[in-house]
Image (cartoon, helix red, strand yellow):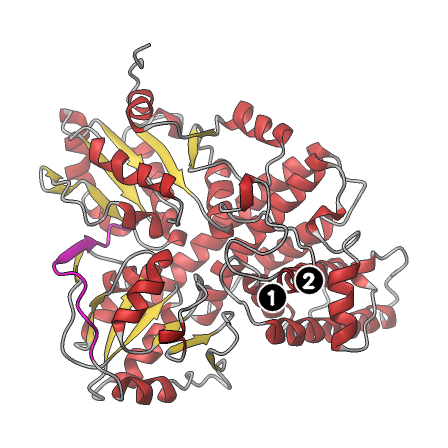
Amino acid sequence: MAMFCFQCQEAAGGKGCTKVGVCGKTADLANLQDLMVYTVKGISELGVKADEIGYEVPGLDRFIINSLFMTITNVNFDKERFLAQIKEGLKLREELRKALEEKGVDLSNLKDAATFSVNSDDDIVYKANNDKERVGVLATKDEDIRSLRELITYGIKGMAAYLEHADNLGYSNPEIVKFMRKALAATLDDSLTVEDLINLTMETGKYGVEAMALLDKANTSTYGNPEITEVEIGVRNNPAILVSGHDLKDLEELLEQTKGTGVDVYTHGEMLPAHYYPAFKKYDHFVGNYGNAWWKQREEFEKFNGPILFTTNCIVPPKESYADRVYTTGSTGYPGFKHIPDREDGKAKDFSEIIEHAKRLPAPTQIETGKIVGGFAHAQVFALADKIVEAVKSGAIRKFFVMAGCDGRMKQRNYYTEFAKALPKDTVILTAGCAKYKYNKLNLGDINGIPRVLDAGQCNDSYSLALIALKLKEIFELEDINELPIAYNIAWYEQKAVIVLLALLYLGVKNIHLGPTLPAFLSPNVAKVLVEQFGIGTISNVEDDIKMFMGETAEA
């Protein structure tokens, strides 16, 4: 059975996975995910028509968001969940179609994605595996059109992740989801030119900014503005639960339900920034952060000893030694993992099973000691603005380096550790996302009391870094954000990084360097456009790159 997937940075050979995903997904799962996206595109074609007449479908927005989130790299490996989700989508699609027909809406000339029919799980599997001329990524024959369609789709997947977290906290923006429907439907439209799709890509960036702003508002309104915080990386001698992913609502409900139980809670990976929010500091059993970036989980989860809860990606196929201790919730899933159902009727999720499981297991094995510092989101940095501006004006800080994004398994990513070590002592790193694990435990010192690594938070908190740049532009009374002493050397891995990139491009940021490789889904011509219009570049080696970023000429 064949597949084709090139949505993440680790795409095999820098071209695409064709037999099994580097992430661990099988060909039949990859094809089901393609059909899931295809189904959402068909629903979106009908949804656009509904939006045009002001007809609202209850649950449609949430379905689209959740379905797309499920297809992000390392989120969900459970085929049964995709079969159920596709069936739910087709039921929703038919209800929408009938409602539009009753309202006299012209439904002629609909695409196959909006009309295909299946009657069983076997039919779904057959469609996914045998109709790739319409369903799969390679259905688009023109490589430039394909490249832009996928760039838009991956950006919207990333957007969906941020919207789901905001929605879980009671914050939504229907206009963003309307755009998502418009954009997804457009990826089915063969009349659109390369230029049309480039314009749509930039519009995706615009709504990406709005999605991140919405999530920032949801997080800070609910939990307060992140503040400078020291986070423990050692352990205590109590049974414990390790929480991975990004969803703060899940963490809050777990912390409430573990109060007084004798069970501690630790963060892992992208959940680390939860410690920066004031609202979480009241929990004395919220101990600290355990481990490092997502790709080290197979060795670190084994040593944690207690149960692990995935609220979002990134799941790595587990070792048998700890597989029975892993739980999923929300959009995540993996065959054999226990799944904690969604909230009902405004009630909290029920975490009693994982809590009781934790009580029966030993305390975590200590793998590190010490503390790491974070909490430099926009409000905290604005509070330090005078100090930072003075450091820039005096020459104490010569340059800022935005090193946000993702970490990953490739040895090439050691470049980012070496780059951070080699940066001149009068430079400061601004980071967000799990890329920080390449350098957040290095002792890089400070400049006049300002740490040389300023961690804003999760990947979605790259929005904070954009706000910081815009604020500095205002303070220094500059015409162009690119006149600031800020360089962008960003590592990427999956689709949430794609929407961050598109958002930065929309905000006018140029000369962003992406690594360790450029996306496989960028055709040569599309890559050329990004290079010529936005100065997108890649990495080479630490010494030459630092000279280039610092405006020095590399020696011949």
Q: Is residue 6 above or below residue 181?
A: above
Q: Is residue 428 above or below residue 528?
A: below
Q: Tell me the element at label 1.
A: helix
Tell me the kind of residue under disc 2.
Answer: Val
**Residue 112, image x, y percentages:** 83, 58
Report the residue marked by disc 2.
40
Q: Can residue 271 be seen by looking at this rendering?
A: no
Labelled pair 2, 1 in contact (Cβ < 8 Å):
yes
Which residue of the protein is positioned furthest toward the right in this rendering? 108
Q: Where on the picture, by quarter, is residue 429?
A: top left
Q: Quadrant of the C terminus?
A: top left
Q: Is residue 49 above or below residue 379?
A: below
**Residue 520, image x, y percentages:** 57, 40
Q: Which mark, residue 67?
A: 1
**Looking at the image, which residue is at 67% across and 56% down?**
181
Which residue of the protein is positioned furthest toward the left in this rendering? 448
**Residue 136, image x, y percentages:** 71, 53
Task: Rate crowding at label 2 as few (under 14), some (14 to 19) or many (20 or more) other CA atoms within 10 Å.
Answer: many
Task: Rate crowding at label 1 as few (under 14), some (14 to 19) or many (20 or more) other CA atoms within 10 Å.
Answer: many
Question: Principal SS element in the magenta part?
Answer: loop
Q: Can residue 425 be seen by looking at this rendering?
A: yes
Q: Nearer the viewer, residue 89 or 124?
A: 124
| 375 in the magenta segment | yes
The segment highlighted magenta reads 363-378
Q: Where on the picture, by quarter, is residue 145?
A: top right
| 31 in the magenta segment | no
Q: Which mark, residue 434?
A: none
Tell me the kind of residue under disc 1.
Answer: Ser
